[in-house]
Image (tube, grey):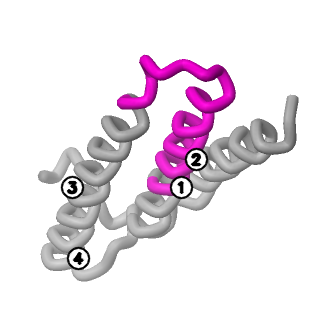
Amino acid sequence: MSLSHLSFYAAFTLSGLGLAFHRTHLISALLCLESMMLSMYIALSIWPIENQATSHTLMPMLMLTFSACEAGTGLAMLVASTRTHGSDHLHNLNLLQC
């Protein structure tokens, strides 16, 4: 395993662990999701170059588009929850009360 593969796997794993263990604020969960998407985007961008396959070059742009949509939706949820609940703490949010 090369150093670049190890760094992508480590970045994805650390952001997944951050998402799993540091769930106090909604903004920290959104940042962990964005770092996971960024590591996946970089890995998908380098993979066709290493394998010299031109058929998979559209996949990183498609994933980047979905990542931008996910970021916009997450920020809209952050603003809406801050306006209704007064903070972005995740323990204040309860899906059963909505």
Tag of residue 82: 4
| Residue 87, image x, y percentages | 31, 79
What residue type is disc 2 on?
Ser
Is 59 displayed left or right of 51 in the figure? left
Badges 1 and 2: C-beta atoms under 8 Å apart?
Answer: yes
The tally of labels here is: 4
**Disc 1 target residue:** 35
Judge the density around disc 3: few (<14), some (14-19), many (≥20) Cα neighbours within 10 Å: few
The Cα–Cα distance between marks 1 and 3, rounded to whole angstroms, is 16 Å
The reply to whether callout 2 and callout 3 are in contact (CB within 8 Å) is no
Label 2 neighbour load within 10 Å: few <14, some 14-19, many 20+: some
Q: Does the magenta stretch include residue 53?
A: yes
Instruction: Please provide percent x and percent y for residue 53.
Output: 54, 19
Magenta stretch: dominant secondary structure = helix
Secondary structure under the numbered disc 1 in the rendered image = helix
Give the residue type at disc 3.
Thr
Q: Give the range drawn in magenta.
A: 34-58
Looking at the image, is mark 1 or mark 2 nearer the viewer? 2
Instruction: Name the N-terminal-most of marks 4 and 3.
Output: 3
- The residue tagged 2 is 39
Q: In which quarter of the image is the N terminus?
A: top right
> Crowding near pointer 4: few (<14 within 10 Å), some, many (20+)?
some
